[in-house]
Amino acid sequence: MASDFDHIKNKISEESNSVPPSLDWDGMKDGIFQKMQNIQEGEMSSDNKLKSIVLLLLCLLTICNRSQRTYLSTDYPNTPTNIIVSSEKASSSMTLEKNTKFKTQQSPHKQTSRQSSNYNLPPAIEQSNDQPIFITPKTIQNNLQKALPKKKEQLVPISTPAKIISPLPSKLFFVENTLEEITIIDKTISPPQKSITVTPLKNRIHLSSGIGFWNNNFGNIIPEYASFEQTILSYYGALHFTSEMKKNYFFSLGIQYQQLESRLDWSTTIEDYEVVLEDTIKTIQNNLISGEVQIIRGNVTLNVNAQRNVRHFNKIQLYQIPLAVGKRWRLKNWEAAIQMGATLNIASFYQGRTIQLEQLIEIASNTHPFIESQWKIHASAGGQVSYYLNNHIGVSANIQYQRSLDDWGKSSEFSMFPSILNLGLGMNYKF
Amino acid sequence: MVEPSVIVLVKKGEQAAFKVMYQSSIAYVYAIVKRYIPNESNQEDIIQEIYARLFLSIKNYDETKGDFKSWLRKIVVNQCLESYRQGKSPKYLVPLEVASNSNVVEEHPLNELSKEEIENLLSNMPEGYRQIFMLVIIDEYSHKEVGKMLGISPETSRSQLSRAKNWIRKRVSYSNKQKIMLNGF
């Protein structure tokens, strides 16, 4: 029999010499060039979109990096005190830093300028930069004479303890100062045994729910029942646990309830549908002799063609285990996260009515005549934007997209790889 | 089919070479499009789309990797399938009870069919059957490739092909019987 189809193949593969006149070059070239232009424009616009997205992401990354730096610097309140003015008479002390290499580079500057402003230090002292400052005792004496206020009561002693987070030993000039005599003691201060670290809260519990849009995504063959059923707005609820790894990457594990809804609209004609008309006039008998009219009433049975319209709301309930990895960015109280992973359907239940061989059938179990959704894996991707009301509690908006990697079609006659888009609101708890 | 020198000129963007390439390949392209898209009103648009894509992507054509004809065929088939996906050709419905019919197979003289009869037969074939029949039997794609192209499983492709074959056999048998009856009278 294969040879028969070979014959068809050979015959059909023969080039057709008769091309319709409408397909000649002159008639087609304008259309072809127009389409070429359209395709190029489409590609350019998609390129531009891609570039804009990349730019936007770069901007976001830059903003997030900056905010992280700010976060770090504000998280370590005990930045080193560079200058402490010490004067027995003035009840103040001053320490000049010789070699500064701290985790936060900006804070020493800030600190210096803040403190120097208390004493109105001259530009020679105020102009601190990353280079070590070498000041001769004479300069210090001169500067102090200029800097120190004339009235003693205006002085405010700075007694902020200097806590150094740098792991490197810092060599400081300790200056004991009097107005008459200045001696410089070269003193090495060993760093604290333990550096100050701020441990961010790494774990989160996230509870969310919202609406879902879904699509059957049939292959080229659409099953009979699907032409009567259409997907409608659906719902979901989820509880996720996330734990942060290095560099703001995190993994997430949870349980999710997904309710996929659809509406069945079906109508059929019922032939010979029996209708009983009760207490209807069946006959009117007219007595010609007496002139009496007798009405006979009773039930009348009629066979008619009836139209039966059925509308039913169906649902597929899925219990899923989502597993994902993602990355998180912070900006003050805001957090943004993206994640990718997989979702496993561990249980599914079906409820509703569908059409099989032009008959309406009832479904109310964990099996469906046409689809099988249990133990199917979906690829998923999502994003979340959260706002933290305090250190622990935040509110969030979420988006999640899922697409089945497995065919839900039970029969080999058709395939379906459903996709779901969930939009929701939720609450986060950080601990 | 198309001279290598013409391909080089088209790659350079010579407008005159576009015309030569079009004229030397249109018969082949039309024959494939006609098989996949029997609806004549869509054919012109799809052929324009095919040539637009051909001229734009010809710079990617590498003659060392295969001949131009097969490369062109791939573009044409992909574009025809794309037109199904975009809904230029309507999706077809195969009711389950019809699709699950197992047909009685009889031997029929398919070898005796002329090209016109075959074309007529295929144009009347349900679109789902025709696509798979064309892809597997005529264009020799594997069921795995067809599955990827159409978004169906290879098993579905196989079963659809078997039904397509049965459909052809049935039709040929029916028309033969009619012929016999007509000749007999």
Image: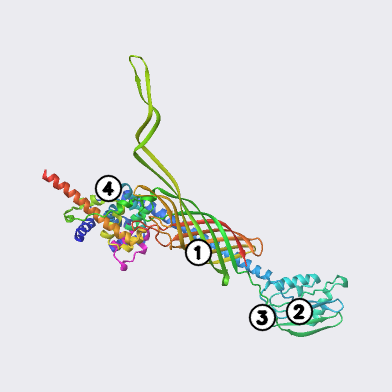
- Chain assignment, label 4: A
Whether label 4 touches label 3, CB < 8 Å: no
Label placed on residue A167: 3
Closer to us: A342 or A164: A342
Left or right relative to B165: residue A209: right
The boundaries of the magenta stretch are: B55-76
- Chain assignment, label 3: A
Mark nearer the N terminus (4 vs 3): 4
Mark nearer the N terminus (2 vs 4): 4
Q: How crowded is the residue under tag 4: few (<14 C-alpha within 10 Å), some, or many (20+)?
A: few
Residue A278 visible in the displayed image: yes
* Percent of width and height locating residue B78: 34, 58
What residue does disc 2 label? A96
What residue does disc 1 label? A322
**SS for dot 2:** strand
Position of residue A319 relative to residue B44, above or below, is below
Mark nearer the N terminus (1 vs 4): 4
Q: CA distance from mark 1 to mark 4?
A: 59 Å
* Percent of width and height locating residue A403: 45, 60
Q: Amino acid at mark 1?
A: Pro
Q: Is label 4 or label 3 in front?
A: 3
Label placed on residue A21: 4
Position of residue A141 relative to residue A114, above or below, is below
The answer to if A78 sits in the magenta stretch is no
Disc 1 with disc 2 on a shared chain: yes
Q: Is label 2 or label 4 in front?
A: 2
